[in-house]
Image (cartoon, rainbow, N blue to C red):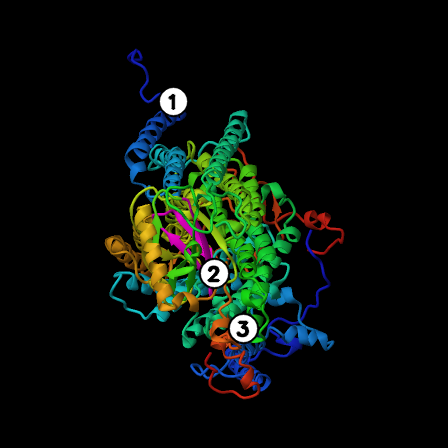
Amino acid sequence: MAAPDSAPAPAAPERSEPRHWLRLVAIWFVLALVGDLLIWFALYPHLPPGRMTDMAAGQQFDIAVLSITAWPVMSFVLLYFVYALVVWRRRPGDDEDGPPIHGNTRGGVAIQVGWILGTAAIVLWVFAFGTYELIVPAGAGGGEGPNPIWRLSGAITTSWTPGSNDMLQVQVIGQQWWWTYRYPQFGGMESTQLYLPNDTPIEFHVTSLDVIHSFWAYQLGVKADANPNVDNVAYTRPRQLGSFVVRCNELCGIWHGAMFNYGKVVTQAQFLSWANGVRAKEQADGLLAALPPYALTYDPTVIPQLGKTLTVLAGITGANGYYYSGAQAGTPGPPVSP
Amino acid sequence: MAIEIEREVTPAGAGPAGRPARPWWMRPAFHTGIVGAVAGYFFGHWLGNFLSSGYPQNPLSDTNDIPIVLGYLFATLGWLAGLGVFNDPLLQMAGKKVRDIHEVSALDGAEPGLAKYFRYSFNHKVVGVQYLFGMIAYFLTGGLFAMAIRSELLSPSYHLLSPSNYLMVVGEHGTMMMMMMTSVIVGPFGNYFVPIMIGAKRVAFPRIEALSFWLTPAAYIILLSGILFGGFPFGWTGYAPLSIQADQGADCYFFAFGLMGLSVTLAGFNIIVTVITQRAPGMRWSRLPMFVWGILTVSFLFVLAAPVLIGGCYMTLMDRTFQTAFFENTLGGSSYLWENLFWFFGHPEVYILALPGFAIVSELVPVFCRKPLFGYRVAGAGMIGVTILSFFVWQHHLFDSGINPDMRPVFMLTTELISIPTGFIFLVGMGTFWKAKIRFTIPMLFCLAFYFNFLVGGISGVYLSDVPADVTEHGSFFVMAHFHYTIMGGLIFAFMAGVYYWMPKMTGIRLNQKLGYLHFWTMFIFFNTTFLPLFALGLLGQPRRVFTYARNLETLNDWVSISAFCLGGSILIFLINLVWSLLFERQRETGNLWQSRGLEWQVSSPPPPENFAAVPVVLSGPYEYGVKDAPPVADLNPPAGVISGTYARTGAEA
């Protein structure tokens, strides 16, 4: 028998296990860093909803920061799974069970505690950041209800003057299936076009005449539900001229999909002349006198100018509103027209 | 720890009260249920017309809501009566003896043939199979509506459907899915396997369990019948006052949803009591399979959240029929009340949809990694944490609706906190993968897809929980992508994992592998190509439930629609696999083909009628893979005296 070779035995079980966690952390670090840099420099300037207003720019920033927080988490989990599926897949012919790791050793407990603390830290960071970004930009463009807590600074005056820091108040009225806008500082004139002055704090008062709608002015970064008999206040401050789209964001019936129109942010001088022009025209037409007086909410069943109160809430009750007709009690028949 | 009652033993094969068994068409079953339903509907409709003759009729449908609601009510009662649900209770109320329910349950399970699946059966395995095929049917129906939605959204200017038909389709799809898929895992796999996994021979309340199933076809048919009335225009969320303004189709939605709420409440109640009281000796809480933990926590959500829904649906039906004004702002009510009631149910509802996915994945991954479940306690804590926290987050659906503004940071916090226990499921999965020996079987592939999909869905939830970012994202396709990733990508993929994993156990037949792999890859790829772009569409400004959108989004919408059609095709492959494997190929597989330590795999495939010949004694946990000299999971033939010694009454289980 020849003497045993002096070369080491092939495929020795003493070959050291690769340091998986080190590999993972190293790859993850590079992946996370590169991803975050790409997000910040390449993606952030193009993120929705753009920078047309302070609110929109704030939301764009928020989405970017959330992405920078989320990408390391996502990339870690994805990387881990891909690594595991490649490195720890079952080799053909190996029907053995794996090592009995329950996670109750010191190392296992440390990992669990570390995970819990780490995820808790990330969550608390996101919460703190989100709360700050909600409060400081005056509600971040979301509807705050009739008693907003976080307001934009701006003087509320009965007539708006350009160049001052007056708040421009715009009432947004949603109804099935169109948006109209009333400007209380211009005599309560009502327009189907939403024109806004640049560089001005805007206070939207969103309400509805029938069912729940939602006023979503995408580029303005504003979303506020329109509830009947409720005044929902939202703020924004445009910084760029241009058009923006307004869409209804709460399913309100069959033409919900068609309930959109376009608005414009114009210079303060242009806005003033437009608003005064509309007001004058409506005054001359007699429309201004026919409109109900400006109020924060409206009840469409009561129209004093028409000299009567509707008793049929057509379309508001079941069976398409055919229940409330007092004239027909006891007699089924065609509905009373208002 | 089992509930013991005195047993009345009657001769085998006898019918109720000792009479010989009657032919199948004379025994109460599906067909008598239909007769009862039709008769009940006509009676209820007549009664409604009789009561409300003074009310005007809607000229479009020539009826008003009261006959319709009463018609559905009596149709449901007739359906249940025809099935024989009331037979035993009425007999007992009359003082007559009824057969021992557990004996009937065992006989039900032993009966050969398919007829037992069409009856009001007390055997939990029969109910599980009934649920399985019912849920698949409901899922496919909802999926067909989805195909119609995506067809309409191919073009912003060319419309296949009228606006009201489009909303009908949208509402039917959403409601069919959210309503029926509540029980998609708990119904089939929870009812079938939880008793076996805890070593029990039966459930605590077989009648209630069977009733919970038989309410689902009624809910399904009533929801579908909305089509005959032109559907309902408010999606699955039912916001008032649109829900009160709507035509008769709305009654179908509220009634069906209320029925389904009742069904899940009953199912949850049965499961909770079963798990608490029917565990075999040795089945400590620390040995409970993670699947059972998941189903147990979901059952608590069922029992606590669904009644709120039932209440809300009832109130809306009152608004619609008897002119109360709960949700009518102009009449003194509040539209916010419905929003809060609905979402108080609605948020636990989505965790009802997520948790069973966690349960299945945590159960299957140890089997296919050949390793114990990492961090068993943390996994359980995750399930419980999600369950408890899910009741504290509902107003995140209402951030922009005009609620009290300082509520929003509170709910932002709770919503973000809930991502911590959700993350535990990933911790546990990842820990189980560490140094494992991963087997890429079809169930495992679906579990892996679950982790990927739920990661995307869960992280997008953090974006939505951030109130400022939510101002742009709320109500847009971003939300749509988020919940499809978590619900379809999570729950439905886990459901498929469960189907492929447990079909051999339930039927003794293994599903075809080639078709299975094809099904998985097409479903996973097309699911992601369909729903990933929706994040972009939402951020680019497309709201939900619209039939038209900005023209520059058409290409992306077309990509999504075509992917959706391919996704539908992959589900078709699944259906073909089911039919081919179960009816034609019938590849028998009666052993423990996954080499699982689960207690359900230690009995035959399909299991014996009473699950176990004798109550087993559980000796160790189900995840002890790789543990040297681990005791077997259970002793299926415990020595005489072991079982009786654990009970106060001797000889009870002899």
How far is mark 2 from mark 1, CA to CA?
86 Å
Which amino acid, mark 3? Answer: Arg
Checking the image for residue A294, the label placed there is: 2
Tell whether position A293 is magenta: no
**Residue named by callout 3:** B320
Of tags 3 and 2, which is closer to the observer?
2
Which amino acid, mark 2? Answer: Tyr
Quadrant where the image shows the N terminus of chain A: top left
Residue in the picture at 53% in, 35% down: B375
Residue B633 x/y as whole percent: 56, 43
Magenta residues span A201-226
Q: Secondary structure at mark 3?
A: helix
Q: Secondary structure at mark 2?
A: loop
Please report, as a chain letter, where disc 2 is located.
A
**Residue named by callout 1:** A13
| Front-most of residues B415 and A74 | B415
| Front-most of residues A308 and A23 | A308
